[in-house]
Amino acid sequence: MKKGSAARRRPIPTSARDVLIALDAWSFQLAPTRPWGSLAGEWDRVKALNRYCRSLLLWWRSQEWRRVSWHQRPLGGPQYPVPVHSLLGTGLHSRRHSSVKADEAASTAPFHLDLWFYFTLQNWILDFGRPIAMLVFPLEWFPLNKPSVGDYFHMAYNIITPFLLLKLIERSPRTLPRSMIYVSIITFIMGASIHLVGDSVNHRLIFSGYQNHLSVRENPIIKNLKPETLIDSFELLYYYDEYLGHSMWYIPFFLILFMYFSGCFTPTKAESSMPGPALPLVVPSGLYYWYLVTEGQIFILFIFTFFAMLALVLHQKRKRLFLDSNGLFLFSSFALTLLLVALWVAWLWNDPVLRKKYPGVIYVPEPWAFYTLHVSSRH
């Protein structure tokens, strides 16, 4: 072969027609390996050509087209074109529709000790510590007609928590749907902000004699209001606080955690273990979620999320995929939460006052209702 012919490169297509002609020619070169005469084979060929044409167009748009040879991949840019034989593989359909792809599961993420630590710390300080701070700080520092220290804690929570959730999603080894993530984050912030207003007024009413273990109409400071339509206004405020705010706050919160959990799988069983520093975080994390489930009255949402996680674990185990360290940490925290909720309900099962406030089959008393009934009433 002459030196000139050896260095000759394949001409680069310059039009869509040339690209399609080249695609058609390359696909027929693989005819011995695929049953093109059958209907299924023809359909596979059409799908493969469509995907390959899309990859060529994306590579062309990256402006690397005219700077590299036809078979050279651009450095630091999109890795196109993909080989045709990889698109026509027999496992294309199963890989495309599996919940965790093989190549994504192979790239196991390390344990996010920093994020989980910050997440647990700010949950305890800004969420659990919020009503405690309102009782500790002197009332003269934060008058009843001004935001309390707990409100400022809630404002910080509404900013820091979405940021940590986004950082957690960024480190996921699996590519998650961006649109759903953005909508969930926006809904989370809106629901937490609604809860901020309702919860602020509710905790301010405690200083005036409001009792959390009683309903709105049964409270001594509410039932004698005139005109009686004011009671409807307080019930509307309670609805925004306990129902609408909690729903718009916690549903996207658990949805984001579940989407992140769906990418926490690895094909290597040796990587399915938690490091030593993760173990001390499981107890405070599970204890916080117990507070979230009981005080937020979201047991149904929590139990649905937990069993969805359990079903996903069993499903991926059949494919020889195992939870990585981050998935084990989240699943262990939720399992501890379920145990603590069961113990909490069993302890207060025969309480007549709380039974009256929480009727029905699902009986999960709120910790602050227990506090106003059995702790603050003794002082």
Image (cartoon, grey):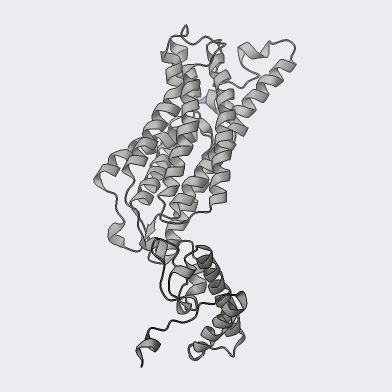
How many numbered circles are shown? 0
Q: Nearer the viewer, residue 378 or 61?
A: 61
Q: Is residue 13 left or right of residue 153?
A: right
Q: Residue at x 56, y 73 (%)?
A: 53
Quadrant holding the N terminus:
bottom left
Q: Which of 375 and 281 is in front in this view?
A: 281
Q: Position of residue 91 (x, y in %)?
A: 47, 75
Is residue 300 visible in the rendered structure shown here? no
Above or below 143: residue 327: below
Q: Which residue ends up furthest to the front in the rendered image? A: 4
Residue 280 location in percent, x, y? 28, 39
Residue 193 in the image: state x and y as whole percent.
57, 29
Image position of 46 (left or right of 169): right
* Vertical comparison of 291 with 71: above or below: above
Which is more toward the observer, 196 or 174?
A: 174
Q: Is residue 53 above or below residue 10?
A: above
In-image side of 217 versus 30 (left or right): right
At 53% from the left edge and 53% from the top edge, which residue is drawn?
Answer: 177
In the image as oriented, which residue stretches furthest toward the left?
276
What residue is at 49 percent from the left and 52 percent from the top?
308
Residue 318 at x, y percent in the picture: 41, 66
Q: Can residue 156 be seen from the camera position used here? A: yes
Q: Which residue lies furthest to the top in this view?
A: 140
Q: Quadrant of the C terminus?
A: top left
288 or 297: nearer the viewer: 288
Picture residue at 51% right of the left edge, 77% below the top: 12
